[in-house]
Amino acid sequence: MNKKTRLIKISMTIFIVTAITVTGIYGLSKSGKQRQGNMASSSQIITVTPQPVSSTISLQGILEPARMVSIISPLNSRVAEKYFNYGEHVKKGQLLLKLDTSETEIKLREAKVAYAKAAERLKELEEWGNRHEVPRVRRSLTKAKLALDAQKKRLEDTEMLFKKGIVAATEYESTLEQYKNLQLDYQSAQEELNAVLAKGSEENIKIARLEAESARLRLGELEDTLKKALVHAPVSGIVLLPHVNRDEQDEKKKILEAGSIVTREETLLTIGDSNSLSVRTQVDEVDKPKVMQGQTVRITGDAFPNVVLTGKIYYISSQARVINKTPYFDVVVMIDKIPLEFEKSIDIGMSANIDVIIYEKTDALMVPVSSIKIKGHERWVIMLDKESNQFKKVKVETGITTTDSVEITGGLKAGDKIGTWYRHTYQSELT
């Protein structure tokens, strides 16, 4: 093969290799663009739009009066007469019960006697210095003093005569003995006067005054108890069974009838103010940190369908009660004013479903859960670029999560278009 032929073969080989290389590069470029187009078409495109979102905790409870007033028994007695029915609406001042007062009336009579004696004793001591006993004792003391002085003079005269030998020794000794006896009489009269005067001392008067005051208070207490034996409604409302501690059994709630025995300080019944209602419920230890005073709640009930009431969290207990080995915290919800058209359909004791709104926003940017990719502590979406019409990765910040959506709090704005993460083998090109 000559030199010219060899040069022609080399030139042909170079041309063929160059043509193949150019064709391959063009094909790869076209394939890449086609895959990008396929990626846009294979992902569901979603426009980010503001929408309302809320997160709630669901609880169950019982409707109760917002205000309950307990009526306490004023004495140990029995129910003589009953003038109400449980669940009945009563007015303030209406007579509800009449308690038997026979034992109290006996105690009242005894208290009147005790007070009269105590008052008389006090008066006697306050006027003690002017009473006949003190002047009598003073007279006795004066008489004893005069007799003693006279005997003393007689003793002195007898002693002088005895020394001169004019009177016998026996007469002198007799006069001396009489003088000593009169000294004892005078001393006794002095002690009697001191004792009589002591009865009217300030200390004794103070004690008598306290005894009289105690007797007066006891008498007044019994008189007041007799008045309270007629039990009237302290407020207008609905008559309920006694409101007892929730841990106590239902048998603690005594149903009163004529003849029922009641004890002093016992809760007879409760008047519930029907003008405002509340709901008592419980929250477990997991959800308690999410529930706070002042949170808005929605209340519904099976007994009042198509009615949605609103209210706020009023009270949250700081101490748990264990029910079936699970700690629960008492929660009270105050219901807002009930519309007039719904008042007749809602009664005390009905069950209620409570939705505590722990988060609510009217213009949240919500996207499907499937549009979020999580890598470590970072969240990503694929957003459709308006200029190139191609997807690109965008880092986002997220808020609450619902069953199928996630709130976007940063990285996107209303009107942006995003896609769901597809599962093709070329997904790695965006990662």
Image: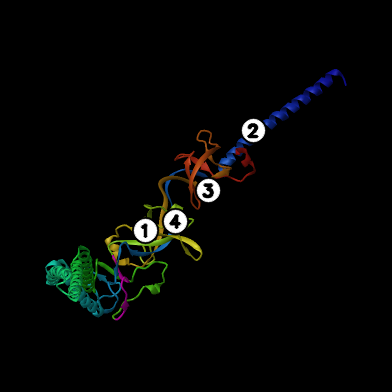
Tell me if mark 2 has few (under 14), some (14-19) or many (20+) residues whose alpha carbon lies within 10 angstroms of its own.
Answer: few
Residue 344 sits in which quadrant? bottom left
**Alpha carbons under labels 1 and 4: distance apart:** 14 Å
Determine the residue located farthest toward the right in the rendered image: 1
Q: Is residue 123 visible?
A: no
**Alpha carbons under labels 1 and 2: distance apart:** 67 Å
Amino acid type at circle 3 is Val
Determine the residue located farthest toward the top in the rendered image: 3
Point out the tag, 1 or 4, that comes first from the N-terminus.
Answer: 4
Q: Report helix, strand or loop for mark 3.
A: helix
**Alpha carbons under labels 4 and 2: distance apart:** 55 Å
Q: Which residue is mark 1?
A: 333
Q: Report helix, strand or loop for mark 4.
A: strand
Q: Residue at 22%, 76% (x, y): give it.
A: 108
Amino acid type at circle 2 is Ser
Point out the tag, 4 or 3, that comes first from the N-terminus.
Answer: 4
Tell me if mark 1 has few (under 14), some (14-19) or many (20+) residues whose alpha carbon lies within 10 angstroms of its own.
Answer: many
**Alpha carbons under labels 1 and 3: distance apart:** 34 Å
Amino acid type at circle 4 is Ile
| Screen quadrant of the N terminus | top right
Q: Which residue is mark 2?
A: 29
Q: Which residue is mark 4?
A: 57
